[in-house]
Amino acid sequence: MEIIKGIPLTSYILLCSILFSIGALGVLYRRNALVIFMCIELMLNSTNLLLVAFSRYFNDTNAQVFVFFIMAVAAAEVSVGLAILMLVYRNTKTTDIDALNKLKY
Amino acid sequence: MNEIIIVAGLGILTLLAEIFNFKKILMPVIIAGLVVALVVAVLELQGSYFNTTFDASVLGMLDFDRFATCFVVLLTTIALLWVLINYNYFVDESNKADHLALILFAIVGGYCMVSYSNFVMLFLGIEILSIPMYVLAGSKKNSLRSNEASLKYFLMGSFATGILLFGIALLYGSVGSFDVYIIRAKTTSADFVMTPMFTVGIIMLLSAMSFKASSAPFHFWAPDVYSGSPTSVTSFMATFVKTSAIAAFLRLFYTALPFVPETFSRIFLILIIASLFIGNIIAVFQINAKRLLAYSSISHVGFMLIAVLFFADPRGIQALYFYVAAYSITTLAAFMVVKIVGEQSDGDENIFAFNGLVKRNPLLAGTLTIALLSMAGIPPLSGFFAKYNMLFIALNHGYFWLVIIAILASLVGVYYYFKIIIAMFTGVSSSSVPIKITLTQKVLLLILTLLIIGMGLNGYVLEMI
């Protein structure tokens, strides 16, 4: 645990912000729904890392409990998401989100 | 707290119904359960003994103060009306117990969102409400439109959740707590310095919450999801989900960050003006009734956010409460008619389907007319007084230009609401077959119409005193 405190907090914030931005940009630019799921997971996990780092620096376990909640909810969310994706795949035979163009104007 | 226990218990009972096969008596049990929840909530509001049997503050996670209990009453009423209106949605479905369970758990999520006193519960409430909605949006399994709505809602919704979480993490990093009252104490103390981290955290929180409330720059998902989902689910999204989201948005400042609306007033003004204009102007070009109502709901969020901006005003929360209640009842009525008409025209909700509706069923046409007039803000209907209260508050705070902008935007709104009304009264219908509705539906339509008019008169009477 000492090794976590050996790194300054700013580095954690920077790392997590970069990870989060990669995730967010991935959601915006990638066209495959599965890759978008992974990018969303990356966003959530960067948040987890940030919360754990803060928790260690503040000596406050609340944030670590929050991380467990985030992990549980993310698992629920992905299971629902994959089910929805299966449904879409059955009807369109593709996971490309550009195939979803029935709702416009 | 008691409502959460009752409704969650009902949800579990509904899941068991699928196994033990007592689906036939399920609907009456659920309606009775929701009525009990409503009665309990009203009793709690009047400060009866329910508050003392269970500690109102649950380990610092939920706090059922007056604000929360008021919104719980409103949410339970909306849920009850919704279940009654969409009774046949569940009768026709093959696996209705699952759908009902999802709805009931979503209601629990809504309760958490209006009563949180810890950011953990804000996050959990949003997710408990959202995840069932992702599934329900796609509940028409063979319809590609429904699938698309579901996947879009899911992708956009989880993206917003990610932003919300990062915002909460940054807020935690600069304040050191998730508890709203500790955050309030720390951020309002004299030696609090607003670090860039704090500011970024607040902005991310604001974006995520305005996404959930579908306010303008973050509204892109709303028209697609609203028009693609089954109409029953759309009406739940437009009323229950929106009410919870707006209440959670307001509670954020009411409990945790009271200085934010003033410090970040420019962001709020952008949200308000963009919602008012984008919602109203794009709605003019819509030919699908559900899409039109989706854009109109975006413009209503613009009005609701005026109260969030001036929440410190003692009339602010009251005005928002009245607005949300009037808006939800009106939207329930409008979507009920859209659903019945849509079923007649093969699930196609074009506004041409409303041509000559007055000849096919005067009651449906009358209810929709009253609902649309109320949305447009014609006195003495409830929508007018809801808007009036909002503008009155803005005027009291010296935002004269905001009032002018809001009135101009509503004037645009009158045009597209009247487009439907004129189609109903003067349009020539392709079929002259009368639309048959059941007795229950007739009674519900009358109740909703009376509520829209009655709430308006109530507001009128209040203004007279």
Image (cartoon, coloured by chain):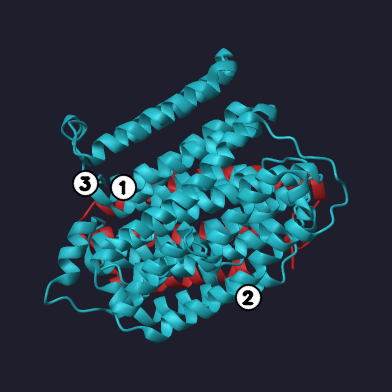
Side (left or right) of B24 relative to B305:
right
Q: Alpha carbon of mark 3 to alpha carbon of mark 1: how far?
A: 19 Å
**At numbered mark 1, what does the secondary structure look like: helix, strand or loop?**
helix
Side (left or right) of B378 relative to B348:
left
Q: Which of marks 3 and 1 is in front?
A: 1
Residue assigned mark 1: B70
Q: Which chain carries label 2?
A: B
**At numbered mark 3, what does the secondary structure look like: helix, strand or loop?**
loop
| Image position, residue B28 (x, y; %) | 51, 22
Q: In this view, which residue lies farthest toward the right?
A: B430
**At numbered mark 2, what does the secondary structure look like: helix, strand or loop?**
helix
Task: Please identify the quadrant where the N terminus of chain B is shown.
Answer: top left
* Chain ID, red in image: A
| Image position, residue B419 (x, y; %) | 70, 66
Badge 2 crowding class, 10 Å Cα cut-off, few under 14, some 14 to 19, many 20 or more, is many
Colour of chain B, in one word, is cyan
Q: In this rendering, is residue A90 above or below A20?
A: above
Q: Alpha carbon of mark 1 to alpha carbon of mark 2: how far?
A: 33 Å
- Disc 1 marks a residue whose amino acid type is Cys
Residue assigned mark 3: B60
